[in-house]
Image (tube, rainbow, N blue to C red):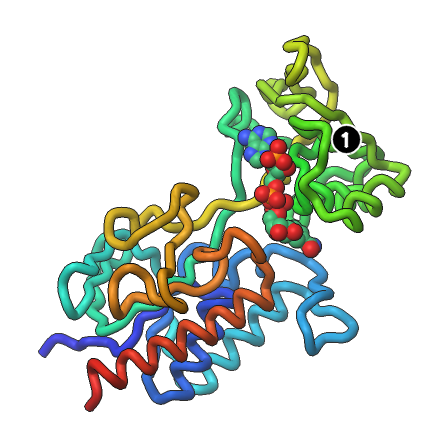
Amino acid sequence: METVENVVIVGAACAGYTSAIYTARAFLKPLVIVGDIDGGQLSQTSDVENFPGFPEGIQGPELMQKFRAQAERFGARIETGSVTKVDFRTRPFSLTIDEERTVRANSVIIATGASARWLNLPGETRLKGKGVSACATCDGFFFRGKELAVVGGGDSAMEEATFLTRFASKVTIIHRRAEFRATRVMVERAKANPKIAFLFDRVVDEVLGEARVDGLRLRHAKTGEVSTFPCQGLFLGLGHEPNTAVFRGQIDLDEAGFVVCPKWSWTSIEGVFAAGDVRDPRYKQAVSAAGSGCEAAIDCERWLAEHHAG
Ligand code: NDP
């Protein structure tokens, strides 16, 4: 007979693992589907200093390992694979993993997080890994003594630029406007760093270089004047996009692609819940994602008790 899972959690980072801990402790035997990156964005960061309970800070990958171990300790089952298709119109719901196997579930918690935003510029894809990166923590090490550009004007850009000064000789933050979106403390920290320079009202039109990045083609946002900016690396500090492509057409998403939750963590389909960055364009913090994972687990547990008791 076909197995029907109580709850399938799609995504394995702060939100997904917290949902797993809670649903496992409620004896729901959750199945967690881990996509490409176990631990999500935190698995690709270094120091995490704002997650409560770690007064000295903790490394992102280590924190995620602890989340996972805690979920497993209570019986969460973890499977690797990408969810390539879902059908939320049938019950039990159906989820296709890696285009080849199907999992049926009475309830689903979506915790697929968000991914770095790219600019889709000429040269950007070709030079990815050859000077173009969206992860300072992952790639900063390779740019010792180099001159770099960071594009963006939010906290991500400030954080990436500040982090990159550990390696680079100079980092220029290139922003398309004259005002930063970033919080004041992050801007002040960047301004106080002697290795950081700023270029305002500039749009990056092209990444230049043959084998590796050797510059950028810039356009002045107001005058239209075109210039060449020499640098050996470009880091995208543009923030993130929700990973919801596979759910499009199945549940309501907002215009930016975030899952819409009309009530608590409930999505537009009863029995499908969402947690973490995938539904959060505002806070995007590890601790808020974990809290949101807890909420989705409790909502899911209550919904199952009402609709699938016994
Ligand atoms: P944001 O959305 O705040 O900022 C994105 C930046 O990228 C904006 O300045 C935006 O420009 C720019 N941008 C977007 N698209 C383009 C484009 N096509 N071309 C040029 N520029 C573009 O994202 P963040 O990731 O920076 O921040 C998101 C949230 O996460 C915030 O709440 C932030 O506080 C938080 N955060 C906190 C951190 C921390 O506390 N350590 C670290 C990182 C993020 P424009 O301003 O013109 O729209």
State yes or no: Cβ of the residue under disc 1 lies below 8 Å from any atom of ligand 1: no
| Residue at 81 percent of width and 42 percent of height | 190
For residue 230, above or below residue 118: above
Q: How many marks?
A: 1
Q: Which of 269 and 88 is in front in this view?
A: 269
For residue 181, above or below residue 209: below
SS of the residue at dot 1? Answer: strand
Question: Can you give x and y, in whole percent of width and height, for residue 14 in the image?
Answer: 52, 67
Q: Which of 281 and 33 is in front in this view?
A: 281
For residue 199, above or below residue 62: above
Q: Which residue lies furthest to the front in this view?
A: 263
Identity, as a three-letter code, of the amino acid under mark 1 = Thr
Question: Would you identify the image quadrant in which residue 67 lies?
Answer: bottom right
Question: Would you identify the image quadrant in which residue 2 lies?
Answer: bottom left
Q: What residue does disc 1 label?
A: 172
Question: Can you give x and y, in whole percent of width and height, for residue 130 in the image?
Answer: 61, 31
| Residue at 89 percent of width and 42 percent of height | 192
Question: Can you give x and y, in whole percent of width and height, for residue 223 in the image?
Answer: 67, 10
Disc 1 crowd rating (10 Å Cα; few below 14, some 14-19, many 20+) is some
Task: Examine the rendering and report whether any part of residue 240 can be seen.
Answer: yes
Question: Would you identify the image quadrant in which residue 80 lies?
Answer: bottom left
| Residue at 78 percent of width and 72 percent of height | 56
User: Quadrant for ligand 1?
Assistant: top right
In the image, taking residue 191 as reference, residue 14 lies left or right, namely: left
In the image, taking residue 141 as reference, residue 91 lies left or right, namely: left
Q: Nearer the viewer, residue 23 or 82?
A: 23
Task: Examine the rendering and report whether any part of residue 135 can be seen.
Answer: no
Question: Can you give x and y, in whole percent of width and height, for residue 125 in the image?
Answer: 50, 29
In the image, taking residue 65 as reference, residue 54 lies left or right, namely: right
